Image (cartoon, coloured by chain):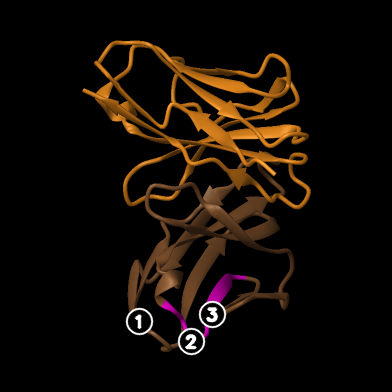
C-alpha cells in the first residue's frame, strides 16, 4: 500500500517568509508525528497528533512553529518568519496508534532551505 | 536526561566481514527500542522493535539484541546494499507516547 507522502520534497525560501509543509499519512493510521533532522544528526521530535488533536507539542522550538491536522488525516506544519537556523529536513511519520508497538513509518521528508 | 548514544559514528567493512553496531541508552523507563535504516535522501525505514532485555530479532543478515543498558545490531556477511545509516531510537514510559529519542546514527559502508 501507499506509504507516508510529503510535499514539497524541497522548499527554498527567504529569511522571514512563511512556509507550509504537508504530510499525508498511511491510510488508517491515527497517530502522526513530525520530526526535524539536521545534517549528521538523528531525527528530533517536534509534535505528535492522536487523531485531530496535538497530544504532545513539547518539541516545537518556539511559537513560530505550528502544526494542524483538522480532519485527523493530512497534517500541515507551518513555520512563520523563517530563520536560517530552520534549514533542515522535516520528516513526517505515522503509526496505527500512539505508543503501543511504536512502529512509526516515515515519509521521505521535505528539505527546507532558508536563504 | 534521556539519552541515546551510538557507536561507532562510521564503520567501513569489506563484503562478508561481519561486525556489530552499538546503541547505549539512558532512559527513565524503557517502553521500546527501535532500529531504523536510513538511505541518503530518504526517510528512516523501520527494521526492529525490542521491548525487554534478552530479546532478539532477526531479518536477513541483521540481528538486533537488547540488554538493560544497550542494544547491538549484528550484521553477518554484509553486502554492499547494506550500506546506509543505522539509527537507534527509544520510547520511554516517562515521556510522551510519541516521542522517539534518536541517536545520531552509525554510517555503514560495505565495499565489494
Where residue B85 sits in the image (x, y, percent)?
A: 42, 61
Which callout, 1 or 3, points to the residue nearer the camera?
Answer: 1
Q: Are marks 1 and 3 on the same chain?
A: yes
Question: Magenta stretch?
Answer: B69-79
Q: What number is the disc on residue B13?
A: 1
Are the residues tagged 1 and 2 within 8 Å (C-beta)?
Answer: no
Q: Which mark is residue B77?
A: 2
Q: Which chain is orange?
A: A
Check the residue under mark 2 and report the chain it is in: B
Q: Chain of mark 1?
A: B
| Residue appearing at x 54%, y 40% in the figure | A107
Which residue matches tag 3?
B74
Does B70 lie within the magenta span? yes
C-alpha gap between disc 1 and disc 3: 13 Å
Q: Label 2, secondary structure: give it.
A: loop
SS at badge 3: strand
Quadrant for residue A80, please give it. Answer: top left
Residue for point 51% across, 80% down: B75
**Residue A27 visible in the shown view:** yes
Q: Horizontally, is B13 left or right of A66 in the view? A: left
Q: Chain B's colour?
A: brown
Q: Disc 1, disc 3: CB below 8 Å? A: no
* Cα–Cα span, label 1 and label 2: 10 Å
- On whether disc 1 and disc 2 are found on a single subunit, the reply is yes
Amino acid at each position: 500500500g501507499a506509504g507516508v507522502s510529503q510535499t514539497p520534497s524541497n522548499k527554498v525560501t527567504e529569511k522571514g517568509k512563511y512556509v507550509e509543509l504537508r504530510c499525508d499519512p498511511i491510510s488508517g493510521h491515527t497517530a502522526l508525528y513530525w520530526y526535524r533532522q539536521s545534517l549528521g544528526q538523528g531525527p528530533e521530535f517536534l509534535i505528535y497528533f492522536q487523531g485531530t488533536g496535538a497530544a504532545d507539542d513539547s518539541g516545537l522550538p518556539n511559537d513560530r512553529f505550528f502544526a494542524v491536522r483538522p480532519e485527523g488525516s493530512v497534517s500541515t506544519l507551518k513555520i512563520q518568519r523563517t530563520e536560517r537556523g530552520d534549514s533542515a529536513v522535516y520528516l513526517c511519520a505515522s503509526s496505527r496508534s500512539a505508543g503501543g508497538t511504536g512502529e512509526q513509518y516515515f515519509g521521505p521528508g521535505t528539505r527546507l532551505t532558508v536563504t | 536526561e534521556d539519552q541515546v548514544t551510538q557507536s561507532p559514528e562510521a564503520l567501513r567493512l569489506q563484503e562478508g566481514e561481519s561486525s556489530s553496531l552499538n546503541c547505549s541508552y539512558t532512559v527513565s523507563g524503557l517502553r521500546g527500542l527501535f532500529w531504523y535504516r536510513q538511505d541518503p535522501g530518504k526517510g528512516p525505514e523501520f527494521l526492529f522493535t525490542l521491548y525487554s532485555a534478552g530479546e532478539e530479532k532477526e531479518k536477513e543478515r541483521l540481528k538486533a539484541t537488547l540488554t538493560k543498558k544497550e542494544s547491538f545490531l549484528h550484521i553477518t556477511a554484509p553486502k554492499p546494499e547494506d550500506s546506509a545509516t543505522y539509527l537507534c531510537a527509544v520510547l520511554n514510559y516517562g515521556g510522551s507516547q510519541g516521542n522517539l529519542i534518536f541517536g545520531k546514527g552509525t554510517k555503514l559502508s560495505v565495499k565489494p
